[in-house]
Image (tube, rainbow, N blue to C red):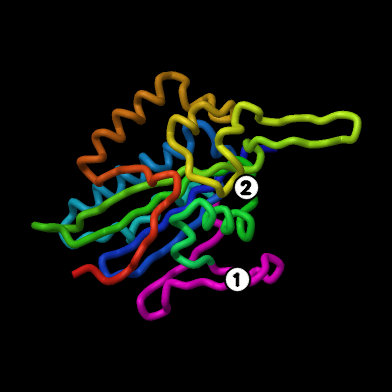
Amino acid sequence: MAQRGNVILVARDMDGKVKVRIYEDRWGIGKQPFMSLMDMCIQVFAASRQLNATTFKLDHLENLKRTNTFEYSKETGYDGNDEPRSTGKFIPALKDYYTPAGVQKINDRLLFNSNGGIVIYVEEKRGLFYGTDVRVSYALFLGYEDAYCEYDFGNTKEVFNKENKSLGRPGDKFLTVEEYAKMKTNSLFNRSGFNKTFSEFEKSFKDFVGLKILPPEGIKIRFRKNP
């Protein structure tokens, strides 16, 4: 038994090559997704300060179980395929990582997930004076186990996660930090002042790596080589 979540890392280098690594976090609820995000921010910022360093030489989240790896480039293209899950050959299109419906498709096709998770986006550009300039953003997505649902057993109807009805179904939207924190499953996020710790961290790393959360509807992307 576990509260299973996922961490999806989407890392783009300055030549337009993208590496995607998907990790399973067996107890990936509460503050755990944010711990992964904070760890990523600290490590890529430190790496970016080194002369000629690249953020992609470090395996920042390898303490988690990696379940899938995908690579995209201008040469191979950024499109995936629509192979059914049973074939084991499904490849997401790169744009799917940036919208709630796309992430949910990835969830349904690839992941053994009950409690949603986090997508972490890392983009590196050549630094103005030395090293690399790194931008980090993230998105929070809902899992089936935490979604509002009704079951009709004939004589009785049972409602689960009534307090989460406003969040919709998985894939409807990305969550805000406030919506995430209010969920019963994630009550540990607010314990021991971690919510305040993350808030201060986010403010600081907005200056360092441009840390920001994606809007509920996600974003449309265009990938091309940086000038």
Q: Which mark is residue 82?
A: 1
Locate residue 112, reporting x and y percent.
Answer: 64, 51
Write the residue at 34% across / 62% down. Answer: 12
Start-end of magenta stretch: 65-91
Q: The N terminus appears in which quarter of the rendering?
A: top right
Q: Position of residue 53 (x, y in %)?
A: 22, 60
Numbered circle sitting on residue 194: none
Examine the structure image and report whether residue 77 is included in the region drawn in magenta.
yes
Q: Residues within 10 Å of mark 2 (few under 14, many from 20)?
A: many
Give the total of numbered labels: 2
Q: Residue at x 38, y 46 (%)?
A: 214
Seen at 42% across and 42% down, the residue is 36
> The C terminus appears in which quarter of the rendering?
bottom left
Q: Residue 153: x percent and y percent?
A: 87, 35
Q: Nearer the viewer, residue 154 or 129?
A: 154
Q: Nearer the viewer, mark 1 or mark 2?
A: 1
In the picture of the structure, the residue carrying the numbered disc 2 is 113
Give the SS element for disc 2: loop
Q: Can you say whether 214 is above or below 159 in the image?
A: below
Residue sticking out furthest to the bottom = 75
**Looking at numbered disc 2 in the image, what kind of residue is underneath it?**
Asn
The quarter of the displayed image where residue 11 is located? bottom left
- Quarter of the view holding residue 74: bottom left
Three-letter amino acid code of the residue under disc 1: Asp
